[in-house]
Image (cartoon, rainbow, N blue to C red):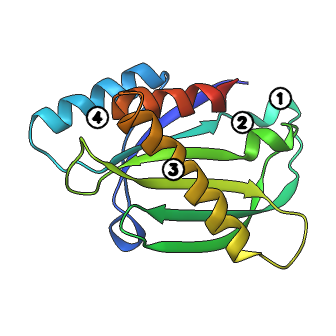
Amino acid sequence: MKKVFIVTSGSYSDYCINSVFQSEKKAQEYIDLMEKRGSYSNYDIEVHNIVDASDGYKLKEYKVVDVLLLVDGTFSISDHLKNTGDMPLEDAEITRILRHHYYSKSLGGVKIQRVIQSAVIDEEKYRKICADILAEVKYLIDVEGRSLQDVINLYAKEASE
C-alpha cells in the first residue's frame, strides 16, 4: 500500500499541515530546511496510507488510544475510532520520538498510538509504556552516544518493518 508523509506542526488549535510528500526522506529534508531558515521548530512527520476506492478497500474501525508524555512530565491521553482497513492491527500502532517544542535538537517526549480492545483505558499502563520508551531513548542518547535524529530514525525504522 502506498503511503504519504505529512509534515505537521503545532497541536490542538494551532495544529497545521505544512506539506505532503511521497517519501519520508523528502519530508525530513523539508523539516531540515525550515529549521535552518529559523522557522517554527516543532515539526512532526505523520505517515498515512493512500486509499483508492477502486482498490476495493474495506474500512474497519478500531478503537485506538493516543498517549503523549513529554520530558517535563506533561501527560495526555485520549481515545478515538480509526479506520484501518485491511492492514494488520500492528500497523495501526505508532511510536514516535518527539523533538523539544522550542529546542529542536533536544528530546521533547514520546507519542504512542495503540489499538485497544476494551472500553476502559488503563491510564497508568500507558503512562508506564511511555516512561519506559522515554528511558530507553535517554539511554541511547546519554549512554550510547546516539544523536536524537538517530534515535528518531531508529523508531521510525522499527515502525515501518
Q: Residue beneath label 2, please?
A: 51
Q: Quadrant of residue 87?
A: top right
Q: Earlier in the sequence, mark 4 or mark 1?
A: 4
Quadrant where the C terminus sits is top right
Mark 2, residues whose alpha carbon is within 10 Å: few (<14), some, or many (≥20)?
some
Mark 3, residues whose alpha carbon is within 10 Å: few (<14), some, or many (≥20)?
few
Q: Earlier in the sequence, mark 3 or mark 4?
A: 4
Q: Earlier in the sequence, mark 4 or mark 2?
A: 4
Please identify, in this view, whether the residue under mark 4 or under mark 1 is nearer the observer.
4
Three-letter residue code for mark 2: Val
Q: Residue beneath label 3, please?
A: 135
Residue 11 locus on image (x, y percent): 39, 65
Q: Residue pushed farthest front?
A: 143
Q: Residue beneath label 4, please?
A: 31
Residue 135 locus on image (x, y percent): 51, 50
Three-letter residue code for mark 3: Ala
Three-letter residue code for mark 1: Asp
